[in-house]
Amino acid sequence: NRTRKRPPYKERPDLGEEDLSRRGEERYAAEAWHDHLRRHRSVLVDLCQGQLRSQVRCCECGCSSVTFDPFLFLSLPMPSGLRQGRQVPIEAAIQAFCAEEQLDGDDR
């Protein structure tokens, strides 16, 4: 790790649509990534880490919350019906990963 003295961890609040529209989503994403790099700076971070944007929207009131989190690995879902010897483009798995999900039951 190239960071000699790590600043204390500070929890970033989830962002609402109003916050994003006021200052811009790209700005919040850049600030979150900058905060991450202040604590974690290495060759591994430079080559392998990225940032994931997550959004949760309430089905009842429509309020939404957006977060930006660093990742090292993405667990991509395997396409359904994949058989031995059949090839599927990686883009199909990435699209499935990015697809909108409807939370129900205990996940709500």
Image (cartoon, grey):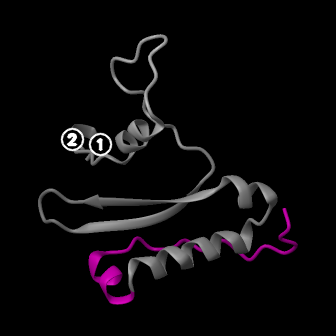
Q: Amino acid at mark 2?
A: Asp
- Give yes or no for residue 20 being in the magenta stretch: yes
83 and 21: which is toward the camera: 83
Q: Residues within 10 Å of mark 2 (few under 14, many from 20)?
A: few
Residue 73 drawn at (x, y percent): 60, 44
Residue carrying label 2: 104
For residue 88, the mark is none
Circles 2 and 1 in contact, beta carbons < 8 Å: yes
Q: Residue furthest left?
A: 60
What residue is shown at x 44% (from left), y 33% (from top)? 89
Amino acid type of the residue tagged 1 in the rendering: Asp
Q: What span is in magenta?
A: 1-23
User: Measured from the top left, where is residue 70 in percent x and y?
Assistant: 58, 59
Q: Is residue 41 left or right of residue 56?
A: right
For the residues marked 2 and 1, what is the alpha-carbon distance in whole angstroms?
Answer: 6 Å
Determine the secondary structure under disc 1.
helix
For residue 67, which quarter of the picture?
bottom left
Direction top: furthest residue = 84
4 left or right of 39 in image:
right
Q: Position of residue 86 (x, y in %)?
A: 44, 16
Q: Which residue is mark 1?
A: 107
The picture places residue 107, in percent across and down from the top left corner, at: 29, 42
Quadrant in the rendering for residue 10? bottom right
Q: With respect to residue 80, does 41 lie above or below?
A: below
Q: Residue at x 27, y 39 (%)?
A: 106
